[in-house]
């Protein structure tokens, strides 16, 4: 049964904000000021208590300095600065570990996610939805190759993944506190957040929106990085590559047995002939290549197992900027921190 709006108009715990906003950032110094200038008025109109948590993923530009200035001027703005670049997926996990709001939103720092859409997110959350995600209405901002690869990926994931992904859904979303706690219990090192959002379930709804042009700078997601990210997603939520090895092995075995029977029959009827050397060489190289490919696939899965059993922390926080950045109640070992907050 949906809860009424009056159930969600303030923090459940004293001192905790109603809404937290996570902003992962990597070399976004030219964007963070304008993001805050648009985001804060929207949040002021939506709720009486909120916090903005930036997660600086080892930026090498002036992003940390700009975040320190923003935190000095507004105590509702805080930031974590990683000791190095750990990747956006890990940055999102760190944000979920440290926010305190009853609802938690995720938004990119480059303003491709319009902050004004948060009004619709909050409205649906107060109606009782526990996961509200933004749905891209088109991908005109992407190049043709990227659009084609994205469509192929979602087609494969929908067909072979453990759970379907909502069409057009990404990281831009709002989650209830219970969803956040469920996500914090997932221990993956090779994280594919879009799949994790779908895996935890909960009552969800999509909000269509148009992706804006990037405000400044260039996207950090080049084709090689996106390809690796897609492979992480497929391997995290599907055993299809391993199954392909089995199916292909069975098919080749059937072909080999059939060919052997044919060769025996031909020899008995017409006598033996001299086998072709090129055919032999091509056959050996083909099957050797198939074996090496699937050894590589198996190696990918074994490598992920190795990364999991080492149990290294997901991230290391070098500095906490702004107000008291408190980590939520521990769910699993994740982080090593060095406290170094900006002056009040």
Image: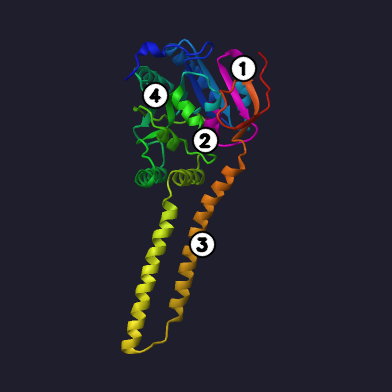
Q: Distance between the residues labelled 1 and 3?
A: 52 Å
The residue closer to the viewer here, 9 or 169, is 9
Mark 4 sits on what residue? 130
Q: Earlier in the sequence, mark 3 or mark 4?
A: 4
Tell me if mark 4 has few (under 14), some (14-19) or many (20+) residues whose alpha carbon lies within 10 angstroms of its own.
many
Residue 281, can we see it?
yes
Q: Distance between the residues labelled 1 and 2?
A: 24 Å
Q: Which mark is residue 89?
A: 2
Q: Which corner quadrant of the image does residue 68 belong to?
A: top right
Mark 3 sits on what residue? 292
Whether pointer 3 and pointer 2 mark residues with C-beta atoms closer than 8 Å, the reply is no
* Nearer the camera: disc 4 or disc 1: 4
Q: How far apart are marks 3 and 4 (CA)?
A: 45 Å
The residue closer to the viewer here, 219 or 108, is 108
Q: In which quarter of the image is the N terminus?
A: top left
* Nearer the camera: disc 2 or disc 4: 4
Q: In which quarter of the image is the C terminus?
A: top right
Tell me if mark 2 has few (under 14), some (14-19) or many (20+) residues whose alpha carbon lies within 10 angstroms of its own.
some
The mark total stands at 4
Q: Find the magenta span and give its range.
A: 71-95
Q: Residue 324 carries which label?
A: 1
């Amino acid at each position: 049964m949906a809860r009424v709006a009056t159930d969600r108009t303030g923090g459940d715990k004293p001192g905790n904000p109603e809404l937290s906003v996570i902003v992962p950032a990597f070399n976004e110094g030219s964007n963070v000021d304008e993001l805050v200038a648009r985001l804060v008025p929207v949040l002021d109109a939506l709720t009486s208590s909120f916090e903005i948590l930036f997660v600086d993923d080892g930026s090498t530009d002036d992003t940390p300095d700009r975040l320190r200035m923003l935190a000095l001027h507004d105590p509702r703005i805080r930031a974590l600065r990683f000791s190095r670049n750990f990747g956006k997926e890990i940055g999102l996990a760190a944000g979920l570990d440290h926010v305190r709001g009853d609802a938690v939103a995720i938004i990119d720092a480059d303003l491709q996610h319009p902050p004004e859409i948060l009004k619709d997110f909050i409205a649906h959350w107060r109606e009782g939805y526990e996961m509200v995600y933004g749905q891209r209405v088109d991908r005109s901002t992407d190049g043709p190759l990227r659009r084609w690869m994205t469509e192929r990926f979602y087609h494969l994931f929908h067909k072979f993944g453990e759970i379907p992904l909502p069409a057009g859904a990404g990281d831009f979303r709002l989650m209830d506190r219970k969803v956040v706690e469920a996500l914090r219990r997932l221990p993956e090192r090779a994280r594919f957040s879009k799949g994790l959002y779908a895996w935890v379930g909960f009552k969800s709804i999509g909000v269509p929106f148009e992706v804006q042009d990037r405000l400044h700078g260039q996207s950090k997601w080049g084709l090689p990085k996106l390809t690796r990210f897609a492979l992480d997603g497929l391997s995290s939520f599907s055993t299809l590559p391993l199954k392909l090895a089995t199916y292909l092995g069975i098919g080749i075995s059937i072909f080999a047995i059939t060919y052997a029977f044919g060769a025996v029959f031909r020899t008995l009827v017409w006598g033996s002939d001299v086998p072709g050397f090129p055919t032999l060489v091509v056959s050996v190289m083909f099957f050797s290549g198939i074996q090496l490919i699937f050894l590589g696939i198996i190696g990918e899965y074994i490598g992920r197992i190795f990364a999991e059993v080492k149990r290294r922390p997901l991230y290391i926080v070098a500095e906490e900027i702004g107000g008291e950045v408190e980590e939520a109640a521990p769910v699993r070992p994740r982080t090593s921190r060095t406290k170094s907050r900006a002056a009040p």
